[in-house]
Amino acid sequence: MPPLRQEISSLAWTKHAGFHLVVAAAVSLFCLFVLQAFPTTASSNLPTLSARGSIEAPGGSCKFQYLLVDDGGRRLLATDKAKASLTILDLNTNFVQSIPTGACRGVAIDRAMHQIYVGDVDGKLICLSYDIFKVQKEIKTPGPIDAITVDTKRHLIYADNDGGKYVWVINPKSGKIISTIDIGGIPAVVLYDPATDKIYLNDKTQSFVLVIDPNTFKISAKWSTHRASKLRGLAIDTRGHLLFAAGHTGNLSIIEMNTGQLVRSINIADGVDQIAYDQETERVFCACSTGTICVFDNKNLDEVAENVVAPPGTHTIALDPKTHDVWISYVENGRSYFRRYAQAP
């Protein structure tokens, strides 16, 4: 090819390639705009929770009352009132064992004191060693215990009076009840929040969350949960300063913790019991006995993000903060299981 024609041909090819590069860049920018403007892509349509298998618990048909993930020990703890035991699932090996404790309900951990605590419906706080699960002490209470929590700053236990109207403050080191708080109703779930250094308590018979000052053992505030009634589940967003209170009749109330004011009420399935909050993904998970896990996205305050089908009767739930997996327990054909759900990104 003559030099001049070759030069012209090369120049034409360069212009042609440059044109295609410009078009490709324009298409890329347009796609990026569409993704940002309309985020409903294939990935966002993935289910929030996906079942990843079940693990059978020993002892046949168990009636687990509460689930709790011990992140430091990589264990799932489940209290069983009917079998009078604490069931422990090793999250690394899937090994399951049951520790005789008495007819326990609430469970809490104080790692600094190397203790696991369970509340007994026969009127005892049972103290177990954190590493070998040996019962070290039993502290008598005036009545049965339901939910419990640990004030990790003062290393005190707050124990709900099951079916009664009291919360007992127990010093496990001395083995004594140091205060009895009359809440005027029936206590449900009790939680200690280290960020605010306060105790928060659901009242089953009244649509209120009570705030207890751990310095005085006095009720310092009473927050209305509005449409959420027959309160059960309770969870806290420590970073966002939000409290989630779930009503058994099918409503989730979100309360601003600095003011005690209602932010939003969300309709959920009936029969809610335990709920859990993931601080990283900003999702609330509500276990409802109708066979539903209601997932609420805290970034979208308008509605429940998804209703995930679960075995009927499911009412316990716990979050693994390390893997972000969600765990439930359920009974099927006379056998008890733990089921793991993985969260979508």
Image (tube, rainbow, N blue to C red):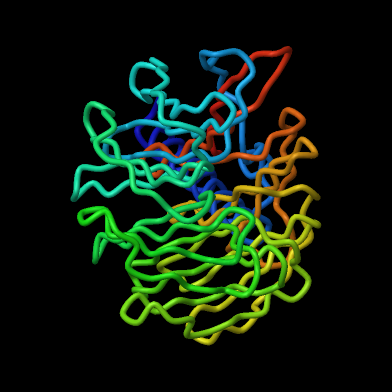
Q: Position of residue 105 (x, y in %)?
A: 52, 41
Residue 281 vs 63, above or below: the answer is below
Residue 151 vs 307, above or below: the answer is below
Q: Is residue 176 left or right of residue 252?
A: left
Residue 163 vs 195, above or below: the answer is above
Q: Is residue 290 left or right of residue 119?
A: right
Q: Position of residue 18 (x, y in %)?
A: 47, 47
The residue at the point 39 percent across, 74 percent down is 198
Residue 345 in sight from this viewpoint: no
Q: Is residue 13 left or right of residue 157?
A: right
Q: Quadrant of residue 43?
A: top right
Q: Position of residue 312 (x, y in %)?
A: 77, 30
Residue 260 in sight from this viewpoint: yes
The residue at the point 59 percent across, 64 percent down is 244
Residue 316 or residue 108, whichever sits in front? 108
Q: Is residue 309 left or right of residue 10?
A: right
The residue at the point 47 percent across, 73 percent down is 181
Q: Position of residue 280 (x, y in %)?
A: 43, 53
Residue 54 or residue 224, whichever sits in front? 224
